[in-house]
Image: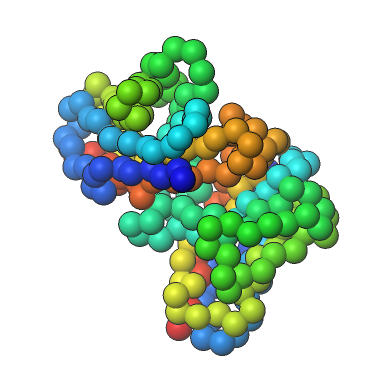
Amino acid sequence: AQSVTQLDSQVPVFEEAPVELRCNYSSSVSVYLFWYVQYPNQGLQLLLKYLSGSTLVESINGFEAEFNKSQTSFHLRKPSVHISDTAEYFCAVSENNQGGKLIFGQGTELSVKP
Amino acid sequence: DAGITQSPRHKVTETGTPVTLRCHQTENHRYMYWYRQDPGHGLRLIHYSYGVKDTDKGEVSDGYSVSRSKTEDFLLTLESATSSQTSVYFCAISESTSGRTQQFFGPGTRLTVL
């Protein structure tokens, strides 16, 4: 069965520092991987996704994630964070033939301090 | 932003009372989902719908029922609310059930059961 583990529930970091939010998944078949972001008191928005092809995917606001099949990981990184990146980040996985259902990780709360 | 609204946005109710949450979309997407979000659990799927009058159970469906009489509306009902159903509820929509397809989320409903 699918599962997703986000290894850190909270990540405090200073502005302009690099950050990595870790995500590992388990699945016996090929998967599609997503990172969603939730700003305070809002719904979830898609940040980036891996479907196929290049294992490194990027978002428009400077985040990137790398799909590592051998380590079953999809860690999210940003070289220099801003105060506005403060949010909760969710890793999610889906498979073909599963009705489009997403399995989410527990979430990582990123707190960027000045 | 995808045209998804949820109502009410906040609700406080008492144990044992029935509660209905509404999700309304203007995107004409066929597929709709209800999730609950709880600290330490991420988002978990309650029920989903593949079309009008076509619904199925998700991971945490006990105590919940759903109905979809129109493409644009997906209702979630707690027949007799319990304190364990205190949570934030999110509706999501998608264009297909392919695992590659992004889901779009509503703003959420915060439900408190006293």
Whether residue B2 is visible to the viewer of this picture, yes or no, is: no
Report the front residue among A44 and B45: B45
Report the front residue among A76 and A96: A96
In the image, taking residue B50 as reference, residue A57 lies left or right, namely: left
Question: What colour-coding does the image apply?
Answer: rainbow
Position in image of residue A28 (x %, y %): 45, 35
Is the C terminus of chain A in the top left, top right, bottom left or bottom right quadrant? top left
Report the front residue among B39 and B107: B39
Tell which residue pokes out farthest to the top in this image.
Answer: A54
**Is B92 situated above or below A66?**
below
Q: Residue at x 70, y 36 (%)?
A: B95
**Is B62 situated above or below B3?**
below
Report the front residue among B105 and A101: A101
Tell which residue pokes out farthest to the front in this image.
Answer: A28
Position in image of residue A6 (x %, y %): 31, 43
Instruction: Classify residue B79 by image quadrant.
Output: bottom right
Total numbered labels placed on residues in the image = 0
In the image, taking residue B89 as reference, residue A13 lies left or right, namely: left
Q: Residue at x 69, y 65 (%)?
A: B66
Whether residue A22 is visible to the viewer of this picture, yes or no, is: yes
Position in image of residue B90 (x %, y %): 55, 55
**Is A65 situated above or below A88?**
above
Position in image of residue A65 (x %, y %): 36, 24
In the image, taking residue A61 as reference, residue B2 lies left or right, namely: right
Q: Residue at x 37, y 37 (%)?
A: A25
Q: Residue at x 71, y 52 (%)?
A: B49
